Image (cartoon, grey):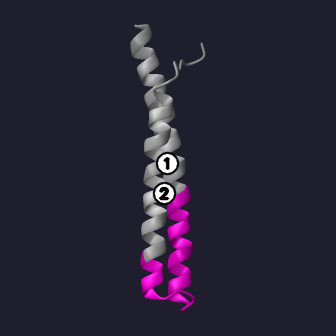
Amino acid sequence: MQENTEDRAKEFLQFQIEKHIKYLFKSYLVLLEEFKDDNILSEEYYSKLRKEILTNGNNSIRELADYLERFDIYFKR
């Protein structure tokens, strides 16, 4: 029972972290799109930056998931 609760707590925490990281890098993508639409960025530079934002966001999610594996996480009673 304790392990199941620990798994659920860890899954919940990981989901919340992923959700907020995705929100953050999606907001950067929206800003980037606005710069492109306003002709501040070339299409080539836009594509390069977009790829970097997505790569960094996905790497952050993976790294945090790896860090979470090092901890025992429980819900408060």
Distance in Å between CA atoms under marks 1 and 2: 6 Å
Point 53% across, 20% down: residue = 73
User: Of helix, strand and loop, which one carries label 2?
Assistant: helix
User: Of helix, strand and loop, which one carries label 1?
Assistant: helix
Residue 72 position, x and y percent, is 51, 18
In the rendered image, which residue does mark 1 sit on? 60
Residue 54 position, x and y percent, is 44, 61
Point 43% across, 52% down: residue = 58
Point 42% across, 84% down: residue = 44
Vertical position of residue 48 compared to residue 15: above or below: below
| Mark 1 neighbour class, 10 Å CA radius: few under 14, some 14 to 19, many 20 or more | some
Vertical position of residue 44 compared to residue 23: above or below: below
Q: Which residues are magenta?
A: 24-47
* Type of the residue with mark 2: Asn
Residue 52 position, x and y percent, is 46, 66
In the picture as drawn, the residue positioned furthest to the right comes out as 76
Left or right, residue 8 beside residue 32: left
In the picture, the quarter occupied by the N terminus is top left
In the rendered image, which residue does mark 2 sit on? 56
Question: Pointers 1 and 2 in contact (CB under 8 A)?
Answer: yes
State yes or no: residue 52 in magenta: no
